[in-house]
Amino acid sequence: MPTQPLYRKLRSERRSNSVADPTPSTAVDATGAEARIPSTDLLGVYRMMVTSRVVDERCLTLQRQGRIGFYVPMQGQEAAQVGCTWALSPEDWIFPAYRELGVALTRGVPLKLLLDQFIGNSGDALKGRQMPNHYGYRAFRFVTASSPVGTQIVQAVGTAMAARRKGEPIVTATFFGDGTTSSSDFHSGLNFAGVFRAPTIFFCQNNQWAISLPREKQTRSETLAAKSVAYGIPGVVVDGTDVHAVYGAVAKARELALAGGGPTLIEAQVYRLGPHSTSDDPRRYRSDEELNAWKAKDPIARLKHELLADGQLTEEADHEVWESTKAEVAKALAASEAMAPVQPRTMFEDVFAHIPLALEEQRDQFEALSAPGATKP
Amino acid sequence: MSATEPVLVPLEYQEEELTTLIGPDWADRLLHAYRWMVLGRTLDARMLGLQRQGRIGFYGPATGQEAVSVGAWMVSKPQDWIFPGLREQLLALARGHSLTTYLHHLFANDLDPARGRQMPCHPTAREVHYVSMSSVIGTQISQAVGTAYALRHKRDPSVAFAFFGDGATSSNDFHAGLNLAGVLDLPVVFCCTNNQWAISVPVERQSAVAHLSEKATAYGMPGATVDGTDVVAVFASLNGAAEKARSGHGPTMLEFVLYRMTPHSSSDDPTRYQAKDWMARAQAHDPVRRLEDLLARRGALDEAKRALIALDADGEVRGAIATAEKVGPPLSESLTTDVLASPPAPAGTGSDGS
Amino acid sequence: MTELTLVQAVNRGLFEAMKSDPDVLILGEDVGVNGGVFRATEGLLKEFGAERVIDTPLSESGIVGAAIGMALYGMKPVAEIQFVDFIYPAFDQIVSELAKFRYRSGGQYPCHVVIRTPYGGGIKGGLYHSQSPEAYFAHTAGLKVLIPSNPADAKGLLLTAIHDEDPVLFLEPKRIYRSVTGEVPDGDHRVPFGLASTVREGSDVSVFAYGAMVPVAAQAVDALGAEGIHAELIDLRSLVPLDEKALLASVEKTGRAVIVHEAPRFCGYGAELAAILAEKALYSLKAPVVRVTGFDTPFPYALEHLYLPNAERVAHAIRTTAKAA
Ligand SMILES: Cc1ncc(C[n+]2csc(CCOP(=O)(O)OP(=O)(O)O)c2C)c(N)n1
Ligand SMILES: Cc1ncc(C[n+]2csc(CCOP(=O)(O)OP(=O)(O)O)c2C)c(N)n1
Ligand SMILES: [Mg+2]
C-alpha cells in the first residue's frame, strides 16, 4: 500500500443535525438498557413464528400444486420479523417489501385475507391486481408492497415526516433486504431521514443473498449497518435469529425516534433458508454446507429451546401449537378457495378516483366483446 | 464586498514542506498553477459581464473553486479520464483544451465542437479526455466507474476522476457509483467539491453527516476531507488518491471544502438565501489570493510578475472573446445530425429480407 | 441452422458476440453464477470469465451508468435489466445520458450500449413483471428500440445491435421465451434494423404487430382465412428505426389497418403508426384505423388473460375493419 495521502485535515466538528429542526438530539439516552420481550408475551411470539412457518410451508406446496401462482418464502426470518413487529405499536405504519409474512401476521392481518391475496380472488383487498406476497391493508397500517425494490424506504420517511408534523406519536418502520441497500431509494430515504430527523426505523433483513448475489458482492461496506454513517444516523447490527435482540434494538430505535432523535438503521443478520421465490433454484449458486450451518441456527428452534428450558413450553404443548396452527391454516385456506374469482369489471377501477370517459368506453367495449357469442361472425 | 476587507487565512507551508509535497521545482509548478487560477478567475469575471450584456446566454462560474481544477491538472496524466461536475472547465483548459474553442462553445457558435447544442459551460473536450457532461446532477459518477472498469480491463494504467458537488452526494448515481467502485475495487478518484451550497440549499440541509467524506465508509473505501481552497493540499491529497488507484489499490473519496464566491449561475440571486457574512468568510479563503500570498511570502512572486500574469490572462481572454464573437451560429443542418450514427431516414425496403 | 427457443437464441447471440469480439462484456443482476433469472446468460460466465460477465449490485442506474462509462472507453457492454419493469431507476441514465451523448458532444462521444431486458405480460407477473413500456423509449431521440418475435430475429437483431454504433434497447418478449421455437442460422447471423418482416401476405386488411403479439395476431389472421378474409400480417420488429415503407406499402394495398400491441392504448406506439397512416396514407384508407391494445390501466395479476389482446379480440378487429364501408 502506498502511504496515506498528505493533506491538511479540516477541523472535525459535528454540525447541528439539521437546520430544519432545532430539537436537540441528546434528548434520549441512546445507551440505555436493552428492552426485553415481557416473558408473558413469549408464548405468543413463539406461536406467531410457528404460524409464519406453517403458512410458508403450506404456500410453497400450494404453488407447486398450481393452486397459487407464485410465492416468496420467508423461512429463517421469523424471529427478525415477529420480534421487530412485536416492538412496534399497532399505530405505527409499516412499509414492507414482499417477504414480510411474519410482520403481517404479527400485525394481526387475518390468515384468510392473506390467502385471498395469494389466490387473487374476490376476497382479496387488492382485487387480484398484484402478485402473491405484494399485499397491503390500510386498516392494519400495512402499506401495499411493490416489486421494484427499495421504493418503500423513502415513502416511509415521508409518512414519518408527515406524522411528526401532525404531532402523532408514531413511527414508521420499513423493511428491506441486503440487496436493497444498493437501491437509489435506500440512499434517498436514509439521507432524507437524517436531514429531517424523521421518526423511521429502517429494518434491513440481511438474509445474505439478493437472489444469487451474496452479501459480500453487494457492497464493500464492512456491515450494512455501517452505511448509517453516511447519513449521520445511528446504525445497529443484531442477530436476527435472536428474537430478544431484535426486539430490544427496535424498541430502542422506536424510543429514540419518538423523542425526536431521528431514525435508526437496524441490520438483522438472518439467512434465507428457502429459495428467493418459487421461480428460483438456489442450488445454482450456494452450497449445502452454508445452508446447513444456518439451519442449525433456526430461530424457531432457538426460541423453543428457551421456552422449554424455562418451563413455559413442553414437547406436548409444542406439538399442540403446531397442530392447532396447521388446522387454523387449513380452515382459512378452505374458506379462501371457496371464494368466487375476482370480477373482470374491477380491472377498470382504481386507476383514478373516478373512471375517465375514455376508460369507461374501453370497459364497455370489453364487456360487449366478452358477452356470450359477441365475437362470432 | 463588505466594508471591512476580510483577513486572508494564510497558507502556512515552509519551503521544505513544499519540496516534500510537490518537489524541488515547487516554485515553478505553483507559479504555473497560479497562472491558470488567474486565467479562470479572469474568465469568470469577463463572462459574467458578457452574460449580463446579453452577449452569451448563460454562465456558471467556478470562482472560489479554482484550486481543485488546477490541483487536478497538476496530478492527472494526459491519458487519465476526467468526468467533470458543473465547475471543472478550468481543468479542461489546463489540460490543453483551447481557450478559443471553449469560447466558441460559450457563444454556442458554429465552431463549438458540440455545435451549440448545450448550454454554455457544458464543454466537451475529447482531445484532453474531458468527457461531455450533462446538466443532470450526478450522472457522471457511475459513468466514471464504468470507464474505470474498462481501464483496468484493458490494462490501461490510467485513472478516472469523477467531480461532483455537495448536492450531488444525494443523487442516485453517487450511491450507485461509489458502491460499484467499492465492490469492484476500481481505479477511480471521487472528488466532491463541497462549495457548501446546492443553489440555495446549504450543505447542512443536504446531509446530516459532519463531513461528506464520511460517506466513503458506506462503500468500504477511504475518504478524507481536504481544504479545497489550498492548492497544495488539493494536489497532495489527489496525488495520493490517484497513485493509490493507479497502483491497483482501489478508489478513494475526497471532499474538498471550499466556498462558492459567486451566484450559483448567472440566473441565481444568492441574496435571497445567503447570510450577509458569507462573502467575507469566502474571501478569507479565496484560493487565488491564498496561493498568491504564499508565493509572495516564499519569494516566488513579486508585484511586477503578478501584474504581468493578470495582464496576460486578461489579454488572452479578450482575444478569445473577440475571435469567438465573430463566428456565426451553427448551421441549421446540425439540428438533425449526431442523433444517431447514421441518418435517421427509414432504411426499410418494405420487403422481408429473407 | 439449429432449432432453438427464443431465449436460447438470445443466449447464442450473446455467445457469438463475445466469442468474436473481446470488447463485448455483460453486466447485470444475477447474470453470472445464476445465468440470469431467465437463463439468457447461461454458460457465459464459465466460457468468458467473471471479468466479462459481471454480477453487479442491485442498482439499475449503476448498471447503465457504468455501461455508459465502459462504452465511452470503447468497450461494447451489453447490460441486462432483469425485468423492464425495473428499468426506471436507470431511466435517467438512459434518457438523459445514453440517448444524448453523441448529440450533446457534437458527435465526439458516441455511446454504444445495448440494454437487453425481458418485457411484456403473460407470465402472471402482475403490475411489475409484465409491462410494455416501449413507447417511453421510442419517444426518446437517440435510442434504437428492437423487439424480436421469433428466435432467428432474436439472435439476428441482437447481433446487429451489439455491432451497431448507437444505443439500443432490446426488448425480449419473455412470454414466448420458451413457447416459440424455430430454426436459427448458426454463426454471425444478422438481421438489419429498420426492416419489417411480412409474416402473412394478404390483400384485405393490414395487421401490424411486434413481439409476443405476433403469434397472437398470426392465429387471428389464420382463423379468418376460413371466413374469406385475407389479412396481411407485418412484424415490425424494429420500432426505431421504423420501416415506414413497409407500413405504407401494405396499407396502400389493403386500404385497412389494424394495429396490435399489449401496451396501453393512449400514446402507445400504435398511436404513432396511426398518425403516420393519417399523414401519409389517408387517401388509401377505406376504413378507420383500429387499435387492439392493453387497456389504459396498470397491468393486473389475476385478470391478465383478459387484459392482454388475444386472437379473438384481434380477429374481431380485423373482421370489423374488413367489413367497414
Ligand atoms: C429495482 C429492482 N431491481 C431488480 C429487481 C429484481 N429483484 C427482485 S428481488 C431481488 C433481490 C433482492 O434482494 P434483497 O434486497 O436482499 O431482498 P431479499 O429478496 O433477499 O429479501 C431482485 C434483484 C427488483 N424487484 N427491483
Ligand atoms: C438531477 C438534477 N436535479 C436538479 C438540478 C438543478 N440543479 C442544478 S445545479 C443544482 C445544485 C447542485 O449543487 P452541487 O451538487 O452542490 O453543485 P454546485 O452547483 O454547488 O457546484 C441543482 C439542484 C439538476 N441539474 N439535476
Ligand atoms: Mg437478501
Image (cartoon, rainbow, N blue to C red):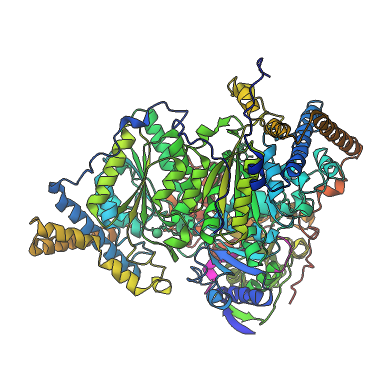
Location of residue C23 with respect to A206 vertically, above or below = below
Q: Is residue A64 left or right of residue C7?
A: left
> Considering the image in quadrants, where does the C terminus of chain A appear?
bottom right
Image quarter (top left, top right, bottom left or bottom right) of the N terminus of chain A? bottom right
**In the figure, C95 relative to C309: above or below?**
above
- The number of numbered discs placed on residues in the rendered structure image is 0
Quarter of image, res A172: top left
Query: Ligand 2 is in which quadrant of the figure?
Result: top right
Q: Nearer the viewer, residue B195 or A140?
A: B195
A365 lies left or right of A156: right
| Residue B92 colored in magenta in the image | no
Q: Residue at horizontal 67%, vertical 36%?
A: B65
A74 and A217: which is toward the camera:
A217
Residue A86: image x %, image y %?
A: 24, 46
Residue A33: percent from left, percent from top: 22, 41
Horizontal side, residue C252 vs residue A130: left or right: right
Magenta stretch: residue C172 in it?
A: yes
Position of residue C78 measured from the top left corner of the image (x, y, whole percent):
62, 65
Q: Is residue C41 above or below residue B216?
A: below
Image quadrant of residue A283?
A: bottom left
Highlighted range, magenta: C163-178
Residue furthest to the bottom in view is C1
Name the foreground residue: C306 vs C50: C50
Q: Quadrant for residue C25, please give it.
A: bottom right
Asked whether residue C233 appears in the rendered view, the answer is: no
Q: Position of residue B315 (x, y in %)?
A: 87, 33
* Residue at the extreme top of the image, as rendered: B3
Does residue B336 appear anywhere in the picture?
Answer: yes
Q: Nearer the viewer, residue A58 or A176?
A: A176
